[in-house]
Amino acid sequence: QLDEIVKKYPTPFHLYDEKGIRETARGLYKAFSWNKGFKEYFAVKATPNPTILKILKEEGCGTDCSSLTELMMSDRCGFDGSEIMFSSNDTPAEEFILAKQLGATINLDDITHIEFLKECAGIPEKISCRYNPGGVFKISNGIMDNPGDAKYGMTTEQLFEAFKILKAKGAKEFGIHAFLASNTVTNEYYPTLARTLFEVAVKLQKETGVHIKFINLSGGIGIPYKPDQEPNDIRVIGEGVRKVYEEVLVPAGMGDVAIYTEMGRFMMGPYGCLV
């Protein structure tokens, strides 16, 4: 096939497996079909390619953006505001303004962003905050990562404070987001992260009285780069998250919370090559 393709398209080029991409998206949605509001917001930074984005849109995905260009690309590819998450740090005013204009869900990385967002674009009714529990993030087979060293996200105290401030400034629907490890090849990462986020969500709703609409597990589900690594099983991961959801959120009367993901590498890594 390649010998034929190179006659028409000069090298170098990237070649993608559309069938593989679509099957992975469908498998992900099936694994989380137990959650009524589930949505995957593809991490555009992983493959900022309009053709790829349009394929994922057809499979029900949204986009996770971290820059002005990614917001513009999502808009041009036909994603509406409800299908766009915007997370960034050290954000210029024009990026917050465009995100708000598009109706994207803005995910604040830092408590100081609240005042800045209010001044440049105004506080939207739906808002999300990025949480960093600090310390070391462990699962049964060892340490995954060290969020305590990361500069992203709010501390527990800041998160509670941020929700109170945002509520006072008119926000009505809230989300929590966290990204604690990258490219994990273990079925335990999401369920362990989910427990951390679900437990803090229950406390937040009780203490601040806000309505938590969604919890975004972000990315971090990786792919095997070495032959001896077992790939992640998305069905096992989805089931693991469901179990924790039913243990923590449902008894707290929070069985309506939507689960979001922001996978990049898992969605695209195995299905592209450079020729």
Image (spheres, grey):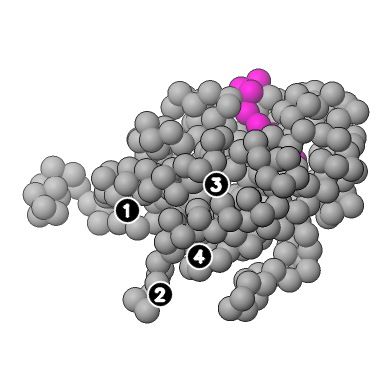
Q: Do labels 1 and 3 touch, CB within 8 Å? A: no
Q: Nearer the viewer, mark 2 or mark 1?
A: 2
Sequence-first tag of 4 and 2: 4
What secondary structure is marked by label 4? Answer: loop
Q: CA distance from mark 4 to mark 3?
A: 16 Å
Q: Which of disc 3 and disc 1 is earlier in sequence?
A: 3
- Report which residue position mark 4 lands on: 187
Residue located beneath label 2 in the image: 229
Q: Is residue 21 left or right of residue 260?
A: left
Residue 271's label in the rendered image is 1
Q: Earlier in the sequence, mark 4 or mark 1?
A: 4
- First along the sequence among labels 2 and 1: 2
- Residue depth check, mark 4 versus mark 1: number of the one nearer the observer: 4
At label 2, the amino acid type is Gln
Vertical arrangement, residue 44 with respect to residue 188, above or below: above
The residue positioned 89% from the left and 43% from the top of the image is 207
Residue 233 vertical position relative to residue 214 in the rendered view, above or below: below
